[in-house]
Image (cartoon, grey):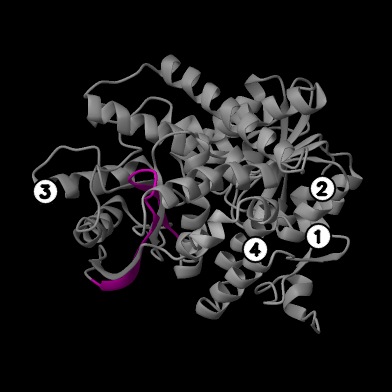
């Protein structure tokens, strides 16, 4: 078969080739399993312009090839074909009015991807970049991420191209209420339980929960990330960032006999995940020397003052440059890409998808990075992952490393069902236990299928097996 390597592959601005080409950072490799190749070609023909979804799917298929070879029952039962096609894709308009009386129309999404092991579960993202491809990529990843936690949750994702930046509280409330007027028709505590994501925090969840309760006249655990006063869980705000560090800590301990203590750390982003990853990394003895937002990055050689950063980003919702104005010795630089050129021991990309490319990865490796753990969803390109793996850098993929958030969401669902609540300390202990379980589950799966030390493959394999076996067991349903 003739192979054409297009510009599309070389810089990955769109998608992999249907012939199965994948750039690892050093050489091009192909999907070799015929079943995997057939499924990817089918997905590409149906989702030609959905580059993020195809990128996520390709990475998973590469990992699953030894599983597919060893377990022909999955091909016989068309498990992959059933898993990569969402159960349903809901797209709707959201009409709302701003403070000046002007009417706006946004687009809302909910992709309920797979519910074989439990109610659909996944966040809502409010950001101008939101489109169907991103919703499908996130929903597909969520299937495996939720499976890895060991909790009974299916995979979903949703959101809107609404931009909350610069909006007043009243405008955000009106949008959230309008959004829930439509989304509320398709969710429920035993059907689909959304949570927050980029642009959707406690404020937005509160507005949506209030609207849902008003519509249904029921007090149910239909959303997670709620305030603790009305059914939320302690530690949910901190969970993704804390869980990322707990996972990375176990990875360092088990695979390198190392820890966060005394290490210089870069955390990209300045949202919820990044802030609490920085907080926990500092508590574990590390020194966070740089953080960024979409405008630029700050470098603080003495260590980021997390309390000041939280005041700037959480309370004031200001740009990250304000931190440098307030903290002596901190430096602000325009453009966030430069953050990866700073020498560090541990890198925690916590901003957005594909923020860290092959050149960034090479700079990190050159400057002595020993471990990379993903806090955002798919923040490293396939080429960047190849660079890290080729260099022998410890690499923790997002679906495993950032699963702490959805793990605590699952605990919130349990607390709502039981009409009880755990203390902060109880949830934190459970979070550490779950993230440790996730690490070892993936680590052992990689060993079993001939990919020792490859946590990307291990996470994909371990997450897939549980869902695949549930699909087969339940017949032609999912």
Q: Looking at the image, tell me whether mark 3 or mark 4 is earlier in sequence order.
A: 4
Which mark sits nearer the N-terminus, 2 or 1?
A: 1
The CA span between labels 2 and 3 is: 50 Å
Q: Is residue 24 left or right of residue 142?
A: right
Quadrant in the picture for residue 289: top right
Foreground mark, 3 or 4, reads 4
Quadrant in which the C terminus is drawn: bottom left
For this rendering, which residue is in front, 337 or 40? 40
Q: CA distance from mark 1 to mark 4?
A: 12 Å
Question: Gap in Å between the C-alphas at discs 3 and 1?
Answer: 50 Å
Q: Measure the C-alpha gap from mark 3 to mark 4.
A: 40 Å
Please identify the quarter of the rendering in which residue 82 is found: bottom left
Which quarter of the picture shows residue 274? top right
In the image, residue 127 lies at what x, y percent?
Answer: 45, 60
Q: Which residue is mark 3?
A: 216
Q: Earlier in the sequence, mark 2 or mark 4?
A: 4
| SS state under label 1 | loop
For disc 2, the marked residue is: 389
Q: Which mark is residue 24?
A: 1
Q: Say the numbered circle drawn on residue 58.
A: 4
The span shown in magenta is 102-127
Of the pair 304 and 344, the residue shown nearer to us: 344
């Amino acid at each position: 078969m003739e192979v054409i390597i297009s510009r599309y592959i070389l810089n990955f601005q769109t998608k992999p080739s249907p012939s199965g080409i994948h750039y690892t950072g050093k050489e091009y490799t192909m999907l070799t399993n015929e079943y995997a190749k057939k499924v990817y070609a089918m997905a590409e023909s149906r989702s030609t312009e959905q580059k993020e979804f195809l990128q996520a799917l390709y990475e998973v298929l590469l990992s699953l090839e030894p599983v597919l070879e060893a377990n022909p029952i999955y091909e016989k039962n068309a498990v992959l074909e059933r898993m990569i096609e969402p159960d349903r894709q809901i797209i709707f308009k959201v009409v709302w009015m701003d403070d000046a009386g002007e009417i706006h129309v946004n687009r809302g999404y909910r992709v309920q991807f797979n519910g074989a092991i439990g109610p659909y579960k996944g966040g809502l993202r409010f950001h101008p970049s939101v489109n169907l491809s991103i919703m499908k990529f996130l929903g597909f990843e969520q299937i495996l991420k939720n499976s890895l936690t060991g909790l009974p949750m299916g995979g979903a994702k949703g959101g809107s191209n609404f931009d909350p930046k610069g909006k007043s509280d009243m405008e955000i409330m009106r949008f959230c209420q309008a959004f829930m007027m439509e989304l509320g028709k398709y969710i429920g505590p035993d059907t689909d339980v959304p949570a927050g994501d980029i642009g959707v925090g406690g404020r937005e969840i509160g507005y949506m929960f209030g609207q849902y309760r008003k519509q249904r006249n029921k007090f149910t655990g239909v959303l997670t990330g709620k305030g603790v006063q009305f059914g939320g869980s302690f530690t949910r705000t901190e969970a993704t960032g804390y869980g990322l560090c707990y996972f990375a800590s176990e990875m360092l301990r088990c695979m390198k006999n190392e820890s966060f203590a005394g290490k210089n750390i870069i955390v990209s982003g300045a949202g919820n995940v990044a802030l609490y990853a920085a907080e926990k990394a500092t508590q574990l003895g590390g020194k966070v020397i740089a953080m960024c937002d979409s405008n630029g990055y700050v470098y603080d050689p003495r260590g980021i003052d997390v309390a000041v950063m939280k005041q700037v980003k959480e309370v004031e919702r200001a740009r990250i440059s304000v931190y440098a104005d307030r903290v002596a010795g901190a430096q602000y630089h325009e453009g966030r890409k430069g953050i990866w050129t700073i020498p560090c021991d541990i890198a925690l990309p916590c901003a957005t998808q594909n923020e860290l490319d092959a050149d960034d990865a090479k700079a990190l490796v050159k400057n002595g990075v020993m471990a990379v753990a993903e806090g955002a969803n798919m923040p490293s390109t396939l080429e960047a992952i190849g660079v890290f793996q080729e260099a022998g850098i410890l690499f923790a993929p997002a679906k495993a490393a950032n699963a702490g958030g959805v793990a605590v969401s699952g605990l919130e669902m349990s607390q709502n069902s039981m009409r009880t609540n755990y203390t902060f300390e109880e949830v934190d202990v459970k979070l550490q236990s779950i993230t440790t379980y996730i690490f070892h589950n993936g680590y052992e799966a990689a060993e079993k299928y001939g990919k020792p030390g490859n946590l990307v493959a291990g996470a994909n394999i371990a997450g897939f097996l549980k869902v695949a076996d549930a699909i087969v067991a339940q017949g032609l349903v999912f």
